[in-house]
Image: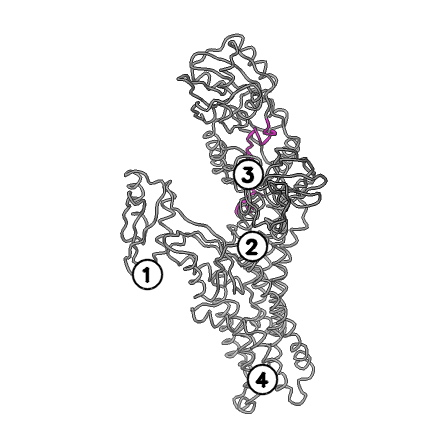
């Protein structure tokens, strides 16, 4: 980019001159920004930087967001090809983050994907693809279903090609090994081994040399560099020994050939790569299972009653679909005729089939069991619950745990450090080992390069995260990112909302009391206001009145957060809410009303009051059944030494009754939504790791504030968007399972990192010859290659053990 070129960053929510001044002042604090200006009319900030404009943009976006405003960005996942190790992932990530307009890029070696957030007005997927290609890799940017299939096909083709190279290399490796180990003195042995090793390196192992060349062009290095340098050096030295033995002898170099080492190292590494790819494929088996849940075709019932089988891609919202016994449901919809039982276990994790009747919702991927029914499609394609689950799991599997940042830093310097150690080893051997110093130094150089494995480090964390997230999805626990999975094990305070979280969230009216002469008009007003609200209590009242009331469309509605709702009809304001709202409106309660309200509260009922601007008109008593799983879950939390707090907007008596029945440690009643977030902050300030569990819009602030946020799957979309975990079945007993999963996953990560570090810390010095002065041991490059191959496989295999863990 040209020096001092202006970069325009689009802005959101900067609606006034004051907002523009705040943003401009924020930009002035950023180092690296030479000039800046905020154009309110154009909703953009103009910045320029002398150096590193990409960093200036990233810092500017962070500052703008920290100030409470936003920048419109696009976040997408793309498949990355041609990566051979963790260093490749680091190089690709650095390339993407160095593009102006990229806010953040994360590349996951384990599932070969890149998660990129970028500003579409500054860059595009096509430009990012070119940048990655220039670095020696590739980005698959086509997001169509056909493209997704083609990406899978590319990966499958690469796997099959790798398998062929493995078997081909073994045909040469076996005789090469036999001659090199047992028949070194046979006539023309060196020439025969030369003949066998050449195709192994430059045909079956050509990917390493091509990759190393591409890295060298960009002044970079990765595992391909290590393999190509080590095997190439051993091969070329062996060629010189074969062709010019007399000359070398005259120089005091009495060396063997190492054709068998160079060739068999290639074979071992290819075998390791094959096993690694196979194991990595198993880490994403949960995604494959979910993707396999959707049938390829459906039977659509036309208006004239004719049935037609069509591809699932042709289904439109509103189509009527016939579901036969034993078949999978293709898209989300609502039953319009017939009834049956549907197995929803692959989405919710619940083994019990769910009854489905007219007006009930059905979801893509679930299995119809006995009856036959018809349903109308409501959500198709990427809008279905199944598609959203798959996307969430893919995003989570591609995200990075905080510990991965340290690993990435180590991986980024790993190859240069190994190269330095190899060169130092060679120099020391040559200088100190006397007559055979050059030869021994060369072998140490080759062995150090061969045994070093950045792949084990790179795979340690992401493979465990992939398996953990996948196992959670199979249990009906959707985890949005690696950070929440890593942190959940540290939870020591759990805050629960009451309605819809502890209780069924299906409140029903148990009694209605009029304190004035009942009028049809008042009933219609009450029904119309509650019908316009999304609150579960409003639904209960609307359902109670629906057969005896008429909806009035002329009422204007205003929601009062944490208090209730108000409606204005023919100039009169009607308030519906709790006692706090009635008191706030200065409505006096009669003795009769007081007695009725207290009698309902003693029964642990929730009381909703209807009043106009002058007097109390009616009271409605509502009960919400406690979930059967709630008590069991709270006992499990206490077993895990987790304090349980309940926050509710409900009245004191109801909250106290629920807390006493379930053994909840702390409860607070009459809590407003903003107070929930403050309560979370207060606990965090005391050093607690706080999890918030909720299901409604009023919980969203507290969910956003909590260290770990958990939404109930049957709650509001906003709560699920904000939360980092979602319990699809809304069963609280799944949360202890999620905490155990977090503990198991973190244990696997620690084990993986321990073995990856220990392997390299022990293996590299041994390869350099540290044991030779002690016991005369020198590691053969051939066995170093085998050790390298097994290191990655062992790390992935350890991650796969998570699949065997029981969560409940």
Q: Real-space Cα distance between discs 1 and 3?
A: 44 Å
Q: How many marks?
A: 4
Earlier sequence position, callout 1 versus callout 4: 1
Q: Real-space Cα distance between discs 2 and 1?
A: 34 Å
Q: Are marks 3 and 4 in contact (CB under 8 Å)?
A: no
Q: Is residue 193 left or right of residue 83?
A: right
Secondary element at image label 4: loop
Task: Point out which mark residue 710 bears.
Answer: 3
Earlier sequence position, callout 1 versus callout 3: 1
Q: Are marks 3 and 2 in contact (CB under 8 Å)?
A: no
**Where residue 525 sits in the image (x, y, percent)?**
48, 19
Secondary element at image label 1: loop
Earlier sequence position, callout 2 versus callout 1: 1
Highlighted range, magenta: 483-506
Q: Is residue 16 above or below residue 120?
A: above
Check disc 1 and report the residue beneath it: 1
Is residue 700 something that shows in the picture?
A: yes
Q: Real-space Cα distance between discs 3 and 4?
A: 66 Å
Secondary element at image label 2: helix
Check disc 2 and report the residue beneath it: 462
Q: Residue at x 29, y 50 (%)?
A: 46
**Are there few (<14), some (14-19), or many (20+) residues within 10 Å of tag 3?**
many
Give the foreground label among 4 and 2: 2
Q: Is residue 64 left or right of residue 267?
A: left
**Where residue 528 sits in the image (x, y, percent)?**
49, 22
Check disc 4 and report the residue beneath it: 255
Is residue 496 on the magenta stretch? Answer: yes
């Amino acid at each position: 980019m040209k020096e001092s070129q202006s970069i325009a960053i689009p802005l959101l929510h900067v609606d006034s001159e004051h907002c523009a001044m705040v943003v401009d002042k924020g930009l002035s604090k950023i180092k690296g920004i030479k000039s800046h200006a905020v154009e309110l009319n154009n909703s953009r900030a103009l910045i320029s930087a002398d150096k590193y404009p990409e960093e200036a943009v990233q810092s500017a976006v962070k500052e703008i967001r920290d100030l409470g405003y936003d920048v419109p960005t696009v976040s997408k996942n793309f498949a990355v090809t041609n990566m051979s190790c963790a260093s490749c992932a680091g190089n690709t990530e650095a390339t993407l983050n160095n593009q102006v307009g990229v806010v953040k890029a994360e590349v996951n070696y384990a599932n070969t994907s890149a998660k990129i957030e970028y500003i579409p007005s500054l860059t595009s997927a096509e430009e990012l693809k070119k940048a990655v290609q220039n670095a020696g890799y590739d980005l698959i940017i086509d997001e169509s279903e056909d493209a997704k299939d083609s990406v899978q096909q590319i990966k499958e083709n690469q796997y099959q090609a790798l398998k062929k190279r493995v078997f081909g290399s073994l045909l040469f490796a076996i005789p090469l090994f036999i001659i090199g180990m047992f028949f070194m003195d046979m006539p023309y042995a060196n020439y025969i081994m030369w003949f066998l090793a050449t195709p192994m390196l430059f045909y079956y192992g050509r990917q390493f040399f091509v990759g190393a060349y591409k890295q060298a062009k960009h002044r970079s290095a990765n595992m391909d560099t290590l393999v190509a340098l080590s095997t190439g050096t051993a091969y070329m030295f062996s060629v010189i020994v074969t062709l010019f033995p007399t000359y070398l002898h005259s120089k005091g170099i009495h060396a063997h050939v190492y054709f068998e080492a160079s060739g068999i190292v290639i074979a071992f590494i290819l075998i390791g790569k094959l096993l690694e790819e196979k194991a990595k494929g198993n880490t994403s088996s949960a995604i494959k299972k979910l993707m396999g849940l959707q049938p390829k075709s459906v039977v659509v019932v036309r208006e004239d009653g004719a049935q037609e089988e069509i591809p699932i891609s042709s289904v439109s919202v509103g189509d009527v679909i016939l579901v036969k016994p034993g078949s999978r449901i293709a898209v989300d919809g609502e039953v319009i005729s017939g009834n049956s039982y549907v197995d929803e276990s692959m989405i919710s994790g619940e083994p019990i089939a769910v009854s489905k009747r007219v007006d009930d919702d059905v979801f893509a991927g679930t299995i119809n069991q006995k009856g036959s029914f018809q349903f109308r499609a409501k959500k198709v394609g990427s809008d279905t619950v199944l598609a959203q689950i798959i996307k969430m799991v893919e995003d989570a599997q591609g995200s990075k745990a905080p510990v991965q940042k340290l690993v990435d830093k180590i991986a980024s310097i790993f190859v240069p450090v190994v190269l330095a150690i190899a060169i130092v080893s060679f120099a020391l051997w040559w200088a100190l080992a006397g007559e055979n110093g050059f030869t021994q130094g060369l072998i140490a150089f080759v062995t150090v390069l061969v045994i070093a494995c950045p792949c084990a480090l790179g795979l340690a964390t992401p493979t465990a995260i992939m398996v953990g997230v996948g196992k959670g999805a199979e249990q009906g626990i959707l985890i949005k990112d690696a950070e929440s999975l890593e942190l959940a094990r540290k939870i020591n305070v759990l805050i629960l909302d009451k309605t819809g979280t502890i209780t069924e969230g299906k409140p029903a009216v148990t009694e209605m009391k009029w304190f004035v002469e009942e009028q049809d008009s008042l009933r219609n007003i009450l029904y119309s206001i509650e019908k316009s609200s999304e609150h579960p209590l409003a639904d209960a009242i609307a359902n109670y009145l629906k057969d005896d009331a008429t909806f009035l469309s002329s009422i204007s509605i205003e929601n009062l957060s944490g208090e209730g709702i108000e409606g204005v009809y023919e100039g009169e304001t009607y308030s519906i809410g709790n006692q706090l709202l009635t008191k706030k409106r200065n409505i006096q309660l009669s003795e009769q009303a007081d007695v009725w309200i207290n009698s309902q509260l003693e029964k642990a009922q929730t009381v909703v009051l209807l009043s106009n601007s002058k007097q109390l008109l009616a009271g409605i008593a509502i009960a919400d059944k406690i979930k059967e799983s709630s008590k069991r879950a709270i006992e499990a939390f206490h077993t895990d030494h987790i304090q349980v707090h309940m926050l509710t907007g409900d009245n004191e008596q109801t909250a106290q009754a629920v807390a006493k029945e379930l053994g909840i440690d702390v409860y607070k009643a009459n809590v407003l939504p903003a107070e929930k977030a403050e309560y979370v902050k207060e606990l965090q300030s005391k050093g607690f790791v706080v999890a918030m569990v909720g299901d409604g819009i009023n919980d969203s602030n507290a969910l956003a504030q909590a260290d770990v946020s958990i939404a109930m799957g049957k709650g509001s979309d906003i709560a699920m968007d904000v939360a980092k975990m979602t319990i699809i079945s809304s069963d609280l007993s799944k949360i202890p399972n999620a905490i155990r999963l977090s503990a198991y996953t973190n244990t696997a990560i620690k084990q993986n990192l321990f073995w990856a570090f220990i392997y390299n810390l022990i293996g590299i010095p041994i390869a350099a010859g540290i044991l030779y002065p002690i016991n005369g041991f020198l590691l053969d490059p051939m066995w170093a290659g085998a050790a390298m191959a097994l290191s990655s496989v062992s790390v992935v295999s350890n991650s796969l053990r998570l699949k065997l863990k029981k969560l409940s």
